[in-house]
Amino acid sequence: MTASTVRPGAAPASGLLFEGAEWDFATVRRVYDAIEQIARDELGLDPFPNQIEIISAEQMLDAYSSVGMPLMYAHWSYGKRFARDEALYRKGYQALAYEIVINSNPCISYCMEENTMAMQTLVIAHAAFGHNHFFRNNYLFQQWTDASGILDYLDFAKRYVASCEERHGVEAVETTLDAAHALMGQGVFRYRRAAKLNLAEYERRRREKMEREARDYCDLWRTVPGAPPAQENDLSEDEARERKRRLRLPEENLLYFLEKNSPILRSWQRELLRIVRNLGQYFYPQRQTKLMNEGCATFVHYTIVNRLYDKGLISEGALLEILHSHANVIAQFDFDDQRFTGFNPYALGFAMMQDIQRICLAPTDEDREWFPDIAGRQDWAAVLRDVWANYRDESFVRQFLSPRLMRKFKLFALSDKASEPSVKVEAIHDEVGYRRVRSALADSYDVAANEPDIQVVDVDLMGDRPLVLRHTMRNGVGLADTGREATMRHIRRLWGYQVRLEETPANA
Amino acid sequence: MAQFVDRRLNPRDKSLGNRQRFLRRTRAEVKRAVDKAVAERTIADAGKGGAVSIPTDGIGEPQFHLSRELGERQYVLPGNKEFVAGDRIDKPKGGGGGGSGREGAESGSGEDPFSFALSEAEFLDILFEDLELPDLVKASLKDTTAREFRRAGYTSDGATPNLAVLRTMRVSMSRRLALRRPSLAELERLEAELAALRAKSATEADDQLRIGELDAEIGRMKRRQLAIPFLDPIDVRYNRFTPIVVPRAKAVMFCLMDVSASMGEREKDLAKRFFILLHLFLKRKYERVDIVFIRHTHEAAEVDEQEFFYGRETGGTVVSSALKTMIAVRGARYPVADWNVYCAQASDGDNSGGDSRECVALLGNAILPLTQYYAYIEIADEDASDAREKDLWRAYAGLKEKASNFAMARVAGRADIYPVFRKLFAKQSRQGAAS
């Protein structure tokens, strides 16, 4: 055994970065440096600084339950998630992820301690470079998230929720958070172009406001008679319009509206709503870019480990281990397979990235016709970087899904009308169907179009204060009964008065 | 550029707070599930933790979702084998666009019960929640406490085995610092310098002067070191132990059972379940719990567990014989000063004529005054229609009025055991009895 003479952590004499399955910190660092060189020099990636944390299985479960964040405010639903994941994990129904990566600056990646060195290599290339580059450069993340502020903000949120629990009781805080969580899906700005989320700025302004209020407080104002009560029930058209204008109705962000306008919420409850809303907004880009994010990370790790092997830095065995796991990750089952659960974002994303590379390097006539801009441009890395920076899933599919891939995946589009007993095949992967299939698939990645579009349309703050919500139905798809009444109860709890939900077809 | 952090040694149980919140919220449901689990389990597993399932009602996280049954939708699937545009595929029965891509992934709105694992401690906590040991008698006996030595800081005198080395050295160091005792390192440095100067061949005037200075300084330091000892008797510290009074933490549990012919397998099994619950409960409250098994027919004997539950014996029924044996065993081995005494008696209620009166006398005079709690359960026939009061029950009923630490209940089936147990130990009943 020559291994016994080698100092732990020292590079093997063979010129490889590592041998065998065991890892240690020196080896991980050496591999990291080799990966970084390829990522920066050959792929031109520009990630946040990395912070790689080694965690145990239990800590991974912890991270699962708190939506992957390193710190989170306390809430029973995270305990529920932990209990469920733990039960599944212990029974062996569910394996744990190899890594979790957080969109923060520095970018934190969690790696499991039980990964082999080959797996750590894969994970670092995947998370610390693939996801990290995507987080830093994609326009949605740049516009909507504040990577350098998120951890401080979570720290603030955690302490704030804890202090509220101390002051107002765990139950009261829980009730508010439950209601806010129920509206998390309706707590994001989808359509308007908001100022970039700056969480540190939020916190500073909040504190200044509190200080100002404390400074300017004067008990005398309490004794001054208020404005005369408004005249009742003369709701002319003009007034209604004026009222809506002042409240900036319609408003798509229910949490924002309730936070600003609810007549019954105390200021700490408004702050809780704001915390939930900010987190919802922070995660919204991730939901819109799942396919691209995973595709980008998978493509990056695949390219990097192959380059490592080409340069003679990892052994054939390590490469095979990585490719085995890679193949498992990108498996896509057919619709009639028992295991089919929808499109696998890793599979489709990776295939599309690879396809773009192929179109750049060796285009066919078909590619030249469909993608005149990029076909034959040898600089595939630059093309991919541009794609990663400027698209989201929906636009990415609409723009870059090639006929060749549609044939490979044998895609077909169905239309399903509730009134009919059968489903119609609208288009398949043939000359007449390509555009139709691609457009239908792109639509299914449009997050906003696949969630209920519910907006606040009217409210009468002077009268009985009824809040009117409107669900605009696309293609006649209404709300499911499951959870609908319970969610309405939560809204009533936050608004304090009657809440009505009406459903109208989109074209009405 | 990159940072590597080893988080594996971070404190565990980060999500403990969330788990407690979750359990608190689902308390009622979990309690019901735990009670059910206990009723279904074998005796050996009665107290173990394990999986429980609760309905999702209270822990749903509702959200608005788009319906899958309304309107018109389009989706794309992979893996086409035979379809061409315009084909029609029948929807599978049971609605819900079968095999469709799950676009709007729903979370936690299913109707399946939510199942998760409880640890043994959590399980027992919930099982015995709001149950309390009746300790009325103990309250009246004032000297039911024992003494124990606990660590309590440091003292400047004590026995050598209790020497607190670290603390002693710390005190010594602060004294040396305060008195400016020259350190060994400093002395060695000066001596080295002196040796170096002396070794020089060409000695200049400056060097000579320096040598003189060093000599004087070294001499002064050595004297000072001698005057200020490294370790002084006033530095020495000892661990201090102080006696504190702790409540007695030992309990003995007497299990009395009638094993005459009228007690069949069913009756014994029911009795055993009750004893197991009582034992689990006592184990949580006391550091040490002894169990004494006494079985009786027309004569009583102390036996081991195996014999107690499975041994065969025939004969008449004289309950007082068991009580007498118990008094004897207690007197011989379990002095009241050290032991909390609990007693559980199971019987089908039969007794030979006239013996019941003696039992009541024994209980009232000799047993109850020295016992924390005495529970009597009567194993009734399976069809509870037979509500005829048995001999022993009638006799004991009078006792129940007088003694607050005596309780009795009737058990007809397996499902009754736990509710009866709860009834006997529920908090409010104790308060009721105390008032």
Image: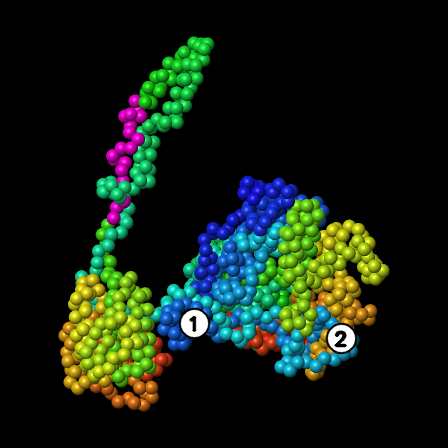
User: In the rendered image of this protein, does residue B193 appear above or below residue A43?
Assistant: above
How crowded pointer 1 is (Cα within 10 Å; few <14, some 14-19, many 20+) is rated as many
In this picture, is B87 found above or below A66? below
| Residue at the (68%, 72%) spot, across then down | A335
The residue shown at (19%, 81%) is B298
- Element type where label 1 sits in the image: helix
On the question of residue A377 being in view, the answer is yes
Range of residues picked out in magenta: B223-241
Residue A48 position within the rendered picture, expressed as x and y whole percent measured from the top left: 62, 49
Q: Quadrant of residue B423?
A: bottom left
Disc 2 and disc 1 on one polypeptide chain: yes
Residue at horizontal 49 percent and vertical 58 percent from the top: A58
Tell me the tag on residue B30. 1
Q: Chain of mark 2?
A: B
* Mark 1 chain: B
Q: Secondary structure at mark 2?
A: loop
Q: Which mark is residue A321?
A: none
Give the crowd class for mark 2: few <14, some 14-19, many >=20 residues within 10 Å.
few
In the rendered image, residue B228 lying in the magenta stretch gets the answer yes
Between the C-alphas of marks 2 and 1, the distance is 51 Å
Q: Residue B139 placed where, x, y %?
A: 21, 66
Q: Nearer the viewer, residue B331 or B110?
A: B331
Point out the image quarter for the N terminus of chain A: top right
Q: Amino acid at mark 1?
A: Val
Q: Which residue is mark 2?
A: B82
